[in-house]
Image (cartoon, grey):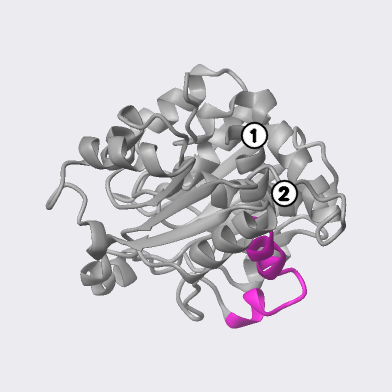
Amino acid sequence: MTQHLLTLMDLGAHGLIDVLDRADELKRIRGRSDHPRPLANKSVAIILEKASARTRISFEVGIQELGGQAIVISGNELQLGKREPLQDAARVLSRYVHAVVYRTFGHDRIEKLAAFSSVPVINALTDKFHPCQVLADLMTIREHRGKDLTDLVVAWIGDGNNMAHSWILASALAGFELRLACPPNYQPSGDVVETARSLGAGQLVFTSDPLNAAHEAHVVTTDVWASMGREDESAIRRQAFAGFGVTAEHMRRAAEGAIFLHCLPAHRGEEVDAEVIDGPSSRVWDEAENRLHVQKALFDRFV
């Protein structure tokens, strides 16, 4: 049966750690003659209905380093669900390529594509989940403070969006504490919270005070207030998220040696101050690089 990565739940607790361990190894041996090439003579379609420089470059480079060929397709070229039903496109792609990377809007779109695909589908982002990014974040955290994540405390400050949802699942699978400070009406989806709590691991803490969330946290992380496709809500969201930007005070409240993460692109002066993202606690550039390594580990596992 074909395995897909649509959410972190598709990895499970042991699979998540296995992918992180493999990403560490692939990063260590990058450029060496003994680096594996599991995608040799294989092709991977990268479908980008939402543009992203980091997603495209990290996946293209990763596929090449694993010996494969990347075929990048913009959403305008395929117009999935308009010119051709998703299920038909999935069946055709399965005859051409060995895996599909899909970055799209509604999560139902990737679920439908995967349901009719006989090759692995990897979620490069949907409106509900962003598993590759949170895997990169966890890899970065382990590089900073060791592989044991069970005593970790992460503070998420901002929108209860696809990143927050993936952090919630990561907390449940890896068993760490996640504190979420989100404005009213911008809370995470209840079904994601329920799924995480059903696993009985990790700890979710909800607070309306970002400073309380950051208190003694090992990681403080955030995202833009208006994600791609919601730019028309920017003015409303700036008002709703007032007081939810990460500042130097949040990092002072955090644990000694705490780090700051952001999936990028960042809006300095909104969700994070320049002195934080450009300061000594920031690990966003390591985090961006690690997208490459965790995605290579996913190909190594799924394809």
Secondary element under disc 2, as helix, strand or loop, is: helix
**Is residue 188 among the parts visible in the rendering?**
no
- In the rendered image, residue 225, in percent from the top left (x then y), is placed at 38, 65
Residue 38: x percent and y percent? 68, 42
The residue positioned 73% from the left and 61% from the top of the image is 259
Residue at the spot 82% in from the left edge and 60% down from the top edge? 257
Mark 1 crowdedness (10 Å alpha carbons): few <14, some 14-19, many ≥20: some
Name which residue lies at 44% across and 33% down.
Answer: 119
Q: CA distance from mark 1 to mark 2?
A: 16 Å
Residue 276 visible, this angle: yes
- Specify which label sits upstream in the sequence, 1 or 2: 2
Amino acid type of the residue that numbered disc 1 sits on in the rendered structure: Arg
The residue positioned farthest toward the left in the image shown: 82
Would residue 294 be found to the left or right of residue 80 on screen?
right
Could you say which disc has been placed on residue 139 in the image?
Answer: 2
Neighbour tally class for label 2: few under 14, some 14-19, many 20 plus, Cα within 10 Å? many
Q: Is residue 114 above or below residue 213?
A: above
| Observer-nearest of 121 and 225 | 121
Judging depth in this view, the residue of 256 and 124 nearest the camera is: 124
Give the labeled residue for mark 1.
Answer: 301
Element under label 1?
helix
At horizontal 21% and vertical 71% (from top left) the residue drawn is 232
Residue 4 placement (x, y as % from top left): 47, 32
Using the image, determine if residue 160 lies above or below residue 169: below
What is the magenta range? 274-291
Q: Viewer-nearest of labels 1 and 2?
A: 1
Give the quadrant of residue 284.
bottom right
